[in-house]
Image (spheres, grey):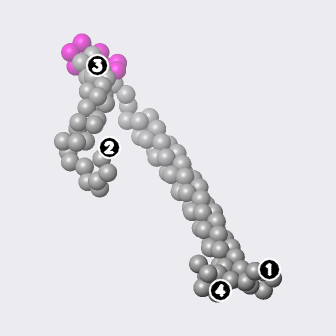
Amino acid sequence: MHSGKNFSLKEVLYWTRRDIFGLLLISAIPVVLYELLDWKWLSIPWLPIALLGTAVAFVVGFKNNASYDRMWEARKAWGAITNGSRSWGIMVKDFVTNKHAKDTISEKEIQL
């Protein structure tokens, strides 16, 4: 586990080496088929690629916005819980007195 804020290039390459080799192999197959075996029918026009890229960008943007909204709602709920527990603790400290006690104790012991 790396708990630092910065990662060196060597560390990133070490952690992602399997993915790099796998994607390199997957991308090399169509290149070899297109260039060496002259399979020109493998070429794709740019318009569908651009259209899919735009759609993916919108989907990712909306999902990112939704996840941020959920995180913000969770922060508000956690803040409400924290503020409520602090208020409850202050009220409890204020209500603990010798007023209705059978055996009275000193104010110093009550404040502890």
Residue 11, percent from left and from top: 22, 42
Q: Amino acid at mark 1?
A: Lys
Q: Circle 4 sits in a helix, a strand or a loop, which is it?
A: loop
Picture residue at 61% right of the left edge, 81% below the top: 109
Q: Amino acid at mark 2?
A: Met
Crowd class of label 1 (few under 14; some 14 to 19; many from 20; radius 10 Å): few
Assign the C terminus to one quadrant of the image.
bottom right
Which residue corresponds to mark 2?
1
Which residue corresponds to mark 3?
29
Q: Give whichever of 2, 88 is nearer the camera.
A: 88
Q: For the residues labelled 1 and 2, say whether their Cβ atoms are less than 8 Å apart.
A: no
Q: Give whichever of 14, 96 is nearer the camera.
A: 96
Q: Give whichever of 32, 37 is nearer the camera.
A: 32
Give the residues in magenta: 35-42
Picture residue at 63% right of the left edge, 63% below the top: 77
Is residue 91 visible to the viewer in this orientation of the structure?
no
Crowd class of label 3 (few under 14; some 14 to 19; many from 20; radius 10 Å): few
State the residue lying farthest toward the left.
10
Picture residue at 65% right of the left edge, 69% below the top: 85
Distance (Cα) linking label 3 and label 4 = 84 Å
Dot in front, 3 or 4: 4
Dot in front, 1 or 2: 1
Q: Circle 3 sits in a helix, a strand or a loop, which is it?
A: helix
Distance (Cα) linking label 2 and label 3 = 34 Å
Which residue corresponds to mark 1?
102
